[in-house]
Amino acid sequence: MLAYISPQYRTGTLTKAGIAEQLRTVFAIHDQVKARVRIDDVRMVGELAWVYSTGEVTGRLRWVGGSVPVLSWQRELEVARLENGRWRLFGYQQ
């Protein structure tokens, strides 16, 4: 999954290293994680793809066994760009 994120990723204060840390935490407390993502719209702005998506992530707690929501979003913007012939998330850098 991190292969699809640019080393230069930044959205606000979140970086690729921050995303990696968040994923380690999620997988440390959940023995199963599921994501459902819907692409709502894609707009090309110069060389960048502005991708709007809606989704949710749920996880099954390792010691309890119950499934719980981890994260959800609606029509959130992510920016992607081609890097070495491959689309990667670049973040919404301002």
Image (cartoon, rainbow, N blue to C red):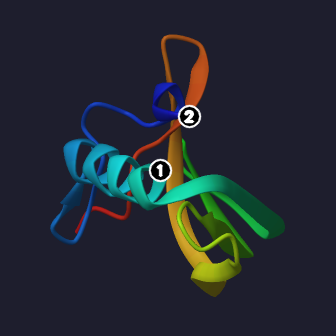
Q: Does residue 75 show up? A: no
In the picture, measured across the screen, residue 31 lies left or right of residue 41, that is left
Q: Which of 62 and 58 is in front in this view?
A: 62
Number of marks in the rendered image: 2
Cβ atoms at labels 1 and 2 below 8 Å apart = no
Could you tell me residue 8's position as x and y percent?
Answer: 24, 37
Q: What element carries label 1?
A: helix
Instruction: Give the secondary structure at mark 2.
Output: loop
Residue at x-position 59% and y-position 13%: 85
Q: Name the residue under label 1.
A: 27
Q: Is residue 42 above or below residue 7?
A: below
Q: Indicate whether 42 appears above or below 56.
A: above
Q: How crowded is mark 2: few (under 14 residues within 10 Å), some or many (20 or more)?
A: few
Type of residue at label 2? Met
Q: Which residue lies furthest to the top in this view?
A: 84
Quadrant of residue 20 within the rendered picture: top left
Question: Quadrant location of residue 92?
Answer: bottom left
Mark 1 to mark 2 CA distance (whole Å): 13 Å
The extreme front residue here reads 63
Q: Residue at x 70, y 63 (%)?
A: 43
Please state, as top left, top right, bottom left or bottom right, where the N terminus lies in the image. top right
The label on residue 1 is 2
Nearest to the eye among marks 1 and 2: give it. 1
Residue 45 is situated, as x and y percent measured from the top left of the image, at 57, 57
Q: Please, which residue is most extreme toward the bottom here?
A: 74
- Residue 7 x %, y %: 28, 31
Which amino acid is tagged 1?
Phe
- The picture places residue 79, in percent across and down from the top left corner, at 50, 56
Residue 38's place in the image compared with 80, above or below, is below
Query: Quick one: 63 or 52, which is closer to the camera?
Result: 63
For residue 81, the mark is: none
